[in-house]
Structure formats: C-alpha cells, structure tokens
Image: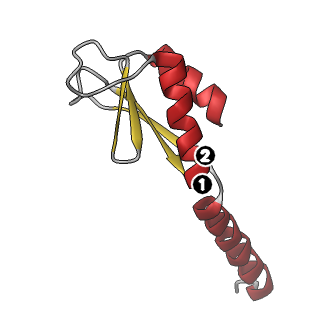
Amino acid sequence: MINSGFTAKWVAELADKFILGLTMKHLDVGYADNQPRWPYWVQPYNYSAKEWSDMTDWMVATFGPSDWLLKNAPYVGSDRKYWFRDERDRTLFILKWS
C-alpha cells in the first residue's frame, strides 16, 4: 500500500520545482553540429526586456557589432539565442549573465 500523504507531498514538491523552473531566470546552453560558423549557443529564459537590452549592449561593447553576413563575426543573435564562434566567448557570456 502506498502512503498517500507521502505521495501527495512528493508530487507537490515536484510541481513546485517545475513551476520555479518555468519562472526562474536561467540559461540553456548547447552545441549545434549543423551550425559550423557559430556552433556554441546560449538561450536566456525569463529575463526582462531591460535585461535583454543590457545583454545586447554588453555583447556589442565586449565583442563588437555583429551580423550573419559578416564572415568572421564572433557571435550572432537569432530566435532569442546568441550563437558564438568560440566556446570561450560563450563561457564569458554565461559567467556575466548567470
């Protein structure tokens, strides 16, 4: 027989963690094999419009302006993600914004 009190508490705690994960600021990171020029990416979640603006300003100040048409651009932005040529640049972004 399952202890229903324990099960209900466990489910409630799991739901609380899930909801916190949906609303808490965090960065997802990854590597895209199909993106040879900028394979390292980071996607911020739950940041305010002001924080996004600050991120963009920081990116330009730190790495310079960027565009998908620039062959050697160190980063590009697309679909609420930043894509980086070098892993060390992505790591710097993560350290700054996490």
Residue sitting at 72 percent across and 80 percent down?
Answer: 7
Mark 2: give few (<14), some (14-19) or many (20+) Cα within 10 Å. few
Residue 84, picture quadrant: top left
Residue 52, picture quadrant: top right
User: In this rendering, would 48 be left or right of 41?
Assistant: right
Question: How far from the left and from the top, in percent, is residue 97?
Answer: 63, 35
Q: CA distance from mark 2 to mark 1?
A: 5 Å
Q: Which residue is mark 1?
A: 48
Residue type at tag 1: Ser
Mark 1: give few (<14), some (14-19) or many (20+) Cα within 10 Å. few
Residue sitting at 59 percent across and 38 percent down?
Answer: 54
Question: How far from the left and from the top, in percent, is residue 86?
Answer: 41, 15
What secondary structure is found at the residue carrying circle 1?
loop
Q: Which mark is residue 51?
A: 2
Question: How far from the left and from the top, in percent, is residue 78?
Answer: 32, 41
Question: How far from the left and from the top, in percent, is residue 39?
Answer: 32, 25
What secondary structure is found at the residue carrying circle 2?
helix
Residue 75, picture quadrant: top left
Q: Nearer the viewer, residue 24 or 80?
A: 80
Q: How is the image coloured?
A: secondary structure
Residue sitting at 62 percent across and 59 percent down?
Answer: 21
Quarter the C terminus occupies: top right
Q: Verify CB contact (< 8 Å) between mark 2 and mark 1.
A: yes
Residue sitting at 29 percent across and 27 percent down?
Answer: 67
Q: Is residue 15 above or below residue 88?
A: below
Number of numbered tags placed on the structure image: 2
